[in-house]
Image (cartoon, helix red, strand yellow):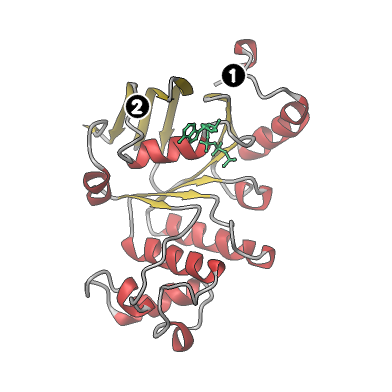
Amino acid sequence: MLTLENIKYSRNSKEIIKGVNISFEEEKITSIIGSNGVGKSTLAYIIMGLSDYKPNEGKIYLDDNDITNFSITDRARLGISLLWQEPARFEGLSVKNYLSLGGKIKLDDIKEALNLVRLNPDVYLSRFVDKKLSGGERKRVEIASCILLKPKFLIMDEPDSGIDLMSLDMIVDIMKHLKENDTGVIVITHREEIANHSDYSYLICDGRVLKSGACSDIIDYYRSTCDVCDNVNTPKEQEI
Ligand SMILES: Nc1ncnc2c1ncn2[C@@H]1O[C@H](COP(=O)(O)OP(=O)(O)OP(=O)(O)O)[C@@H](O)[C@H]1O
């Protein structure tokens, strides 16, 4: 269980996260949805422990461990991973070497992961993770590396960004694969096609959880209420 307890975070004197309580379970897909700029990616960076994203208040627990002050490296070691919205490039590193994680991963597993992200291993193992790979191809390689890490929790920040619409079902298949392999998936998404496959959803508004529950209820609420709202939380609306 990964638990956020009353997390508050400010940046340049602006309060971005205003007291968030969320629990994520392993072997479950949890979606985080909400309008642009409400703090979803910020929450992802706080959970991952990026150096500029230390909460001003609150605690983060992985099972019974208080990891609030743990570095990104310590959290990665404990099994928390993040799929970035924008994947990085590594000039001069082949896909095969990049995915072998320093030789720790077997070639067959690398091939299986490439097949899952629908990149033909015969074509892509020898390609380089540089600017000759398209954004979508790099994103797929990045997703493959997250699969191979077998994390306890994987935060997927808009996993479809840069991926063609025809491949949304691939993202869904990958989330299901991760779940079947005991990874807790935390997916930040604007896509109903992706959120629909989550076991539980949180709707974020103005740095707070506005509502949580079954994905279909949250999406119905979001559609009927949030599209017409001015993006400011109303405490009365809070039904956490
Ligand atoms: N480095 C920063 N300095 C100041 N404000 C920031 C910084 N990064 C983000 N913000 C602000 O924090 C708020 C939350 O941003 P965040 O990226 O977490 O939103 P989001 O919900 O992920 O949005 P989107 O759906 O557009 O990706 C926004 O108002 C944004 O402008």
Q: Quadrant of the C terminus?
A: top right
Of 225 and 72, nearer the camera is: 72
Residue 75 left/right relative to 42: left
Q: Where is residue 143 in the image (x, y as percent from the top left)?
A: 45, 63
Of 121 and 116, nearer the camera is: 121
Which residue type does callout 1 highlight? Answer: Glu
Residue at image mark 2? 55
Residue at image mark 1? 239
Q: Quadrant of the N terminus?
A: top left
- Seen at 59% across and 17% down, the residue is 238
Q: Position of residue 173 (x, y in %)?
A: 55, 63
Residue 212 visible within the image: no
Q: In this view, does 178 lie above or below 37?
A: below
- Seen at 43% across and 20% down, the residue is 13
Disc 1 element: loop
- Seen at 44% across and 29% down, the residue is 22
- Seen at 38% across and 77% down, the residue is 95
